[in-house]
Image (spheres, rainbow, N blue to C red):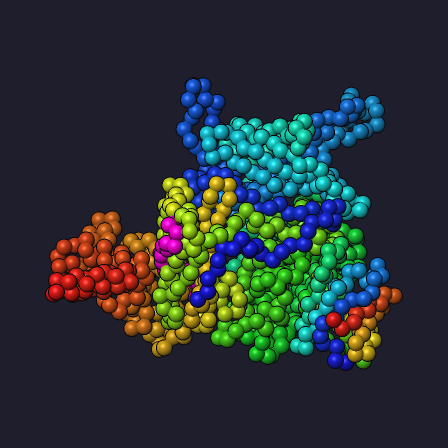
Amino acid sequence: MSTHTGNGSAVLPAEPPYVPEATLPPLPDTIDTEAAMATDDESVGLAVEVEDRPVLAPHPGPFPPPHRPKSLRAGCYLMRYTPIQRAGALQPLHYDGTLRVDRLSRTNVTASGDLYVHQPLKIWPGHLPSGLIRPSEPNPALGIPIFARKNYRYYMRVTQILEGSTFANKFTLGFELHRFNHTTKAWTVEGPFTAKMVWSAAPPGFPSSGNYLHGEVKTAAGPAAGRLTMGWISKYLRKATLEIDRVNASETPLDNGAGIDWRDIYDAIGWEVMLDVSDADVNEPSGEFWSDAEMHAAMLARRDAADLDREWRFHLICVRRLDSTERGIMYDAYGGDSNNIPREGAGISSHWTIPNTATWGKVRGLRFGTAAAPYFRTGVHEIGHAMGLYHNAVDNGFMHTTPDIAASAVPPVQFPDNILWAFSPDDRKRLRHLPDIWVRPGGISFGAAYGTVPISPTDSIEEAEGLTLTVKPLLETVPIGAPVRVDFTITNETEQALPIPASLSMKAGAVHGRVVDPSGAVRTFWPLVRCIEKDELRELEPGGSVTDSATILRGAEGALFPAPGAYRVFVDVEWALGEATIRLSGDSPIMVTPPVDESHAAAALRILTTPDALLTLALGGDHLEEGIEAIQTALEDDVLGPHYAYIEAKRVGNRFGGRKADVDAAAELLSEDTVMSTRESRKAVELLESDKDVAGRDRSKDLIEVLTDRTTGGEKKKRSRKRAKAKAR
Amino acid sequence: MEVAGRWRKVSRSDCSAPYPELLELEPGGRYTGWNEAPSDHHPLWDRGGWGPAGPDRLQISLANDAVREYAVEYDGDALVFDDGAGCRIEYVRA
């Protein structure tokens, strides 16, 4: 067990300082927003559509309208910035672009944008009455627009989004504009700017009438600089197409063989990617092996579309073997780019033979194209390079190198089961928020450094000085298939009362966490259900502590403990305090043991492969038949039975639909051997005491006493003994 | 050649700028390259595999996963790569 104290130290390693006029502007910081977002967006990231927001009409009366927290809807906005025209300017000018709003949690948002110049083109006098051609405006009804690369001008680094938590129908947007020089590839900072953005009705064509804003842009010194409008157009942040061509003998990498495909991967980073599985008969110009130049030529000859100013099209070619490497390459770089348009394509090899050594685990000796998981992963990895990403060893995600992932597998987990099917958090942020010109095909050449650009720390998250969070598992060793129960305790080590969340229940929303498996892969767990009115706080007295529990089984990435081995469970408690977000973290090791017999193995497999088992665990009820059946299988097993008895007791002991609560049946399921967290023990006592007949039985009385002792640390028994002694005297 | 270990770049030529300031060649055939100071270049050798490619030749994978061969000179404390295009990248043991 270890403890993380909030001593104000940085969560992430120190970043190098940002150097102005470097190769890339700094990414936007994660911005702490003012409002609690519970009313309209309790999800994380982009997973949940937010309902259209009604526009508040100006209030006519003397009293303000009722409190209504407002927040920016996550997704992509069509943006227009119209600077105040310079004196003497002959042509009107504005910039079009997109603004990406990315919610990390209820109170944190990262936003960034890109602006492309929109200027009428001069034509020969006399051809048109005005002498100008006016380019068409992007149509908001068509989703995320694609602009011509030559018109790229500014990266908008959003530094402040103070969304109103009051009755205001506006918020302050703070930003810098980083102008891109196409010749030197350098960036120059302009600003900072602020804009009071006001919600208003969207013009026709916008898909979400209530998510349109406008505002006057001002410089730091105060003078007006222009006008900004932004209207929501998509839940995605960016849009691209991936075309896959192949030679006849090669496989098309469509998914990882276990249900994860291209769409899943790009959805997770907020990219709307259209998959174009195209030619399957690309000719081999010189036999089995392909040079970089041959792949580049095949891309130019065979791809279905080539206008990168109308479509971000990446190209993947699948060939038998590669001249310059074994598995895959993003050939459109370092001299392999014959048309001087960088990062358009990549190639992978289907006929490389995976070494027949233990390192390569379950795919040892296979032809690469037949090993679905690593073959598909290599395709994602190479297209990641085409999107401007470099190798990243922070986890076993997509931009780590395949041999290193294979070598990191810790038995009994074998490669490729230890692949993390996600981009690492910093790469995810890069794909969402690096400038368009960095990630789009045909933009900045591969090889420029993110280097001088500090990846924004989550600097709006503050460690809670004076508070500690300790995590203690109920059992340090659990059999595979069992949920893991942890108690976590916040302690105030100062001499003054400190604010903490009023409830540490998972449902209250402040608690979430992650599990690191034996190979280093990270899986997260979040509240399945949130019951939030608002972020209520309470004061924790000096020296005081408060404990709660979590029972965890599955997370967003599937089963949290899918194989035997040593895990580490991290619990994070996060809450809003004013404009800051406070966080505490603690962790503890857990050992998951292998199945002891066939019954245990079968029950564990059923639990681990039934997503509804978690829902049944968290929600109870009779509606999730598969979940209930999986838990029944576990109950019938001697090893797992005690770990699931309370879950079933909770289900049958509570009313559901027309079925009455059966406390009697619940009591039969429970015993002193039932594995229960502190919270579950407390709930079990409440359940037993809810039926006087059941509570009055000797067996129940004994059980209630034992469970009460567990939840109070034996204090009640000690007091009882003291009273008995006093009486005896 | 026992070239495994940590190396520091001493070349300051423009052509050597994309190569990492520090290079850790692991005995198992994997390597990591990185810069300590801000640079306009992402290291051409950032992470991947390396190994012998014949007498006085090494192969190293690049940041885009290509594998490139280099003629090398090695004297125990110095390691010089020749990229075949006129650029020499000199390292000393760190």
Residue at image point 54% right, 33% down: A171
Q: Is residue A546 above or below residue A37?
A: below
Q: Is residue A49 above or below residue A3?
A: above
Closer to the camera in the image, A484 or A403: A484
Identify the magenta region: A540-561
Q: Is residue A253 above or below residue A534?
A: below
Residue at image point 59% right, 79% down: A357
Question: How far across and down, in percent of the image, does residue A248 sit?
Answer: 65, 64
Q: Is residue A621 left or right of residue A189?
A: left
Q: Is residue A488 left or right of residue B92?
A: left
Q: State which quarter of the image contains the C terminus of chain B.
A: bottom right
Closer to the camera in the image, A558 or A671: A671
Is any atom of residue A87 visible in this view?
yes
Question: How far across and down, in percent of the image, does residue A638 sit?
Answer: 29, 73
Closer to the camera in the image, A435 or A716: A716
Residue at image point 33% right, 53% down: A619
Q: Is residue B32 left or right of residue A53?
A: right
Total number of numbered discs in the rendering: 0
Closer to the camera in the image, A637 or A206: A637
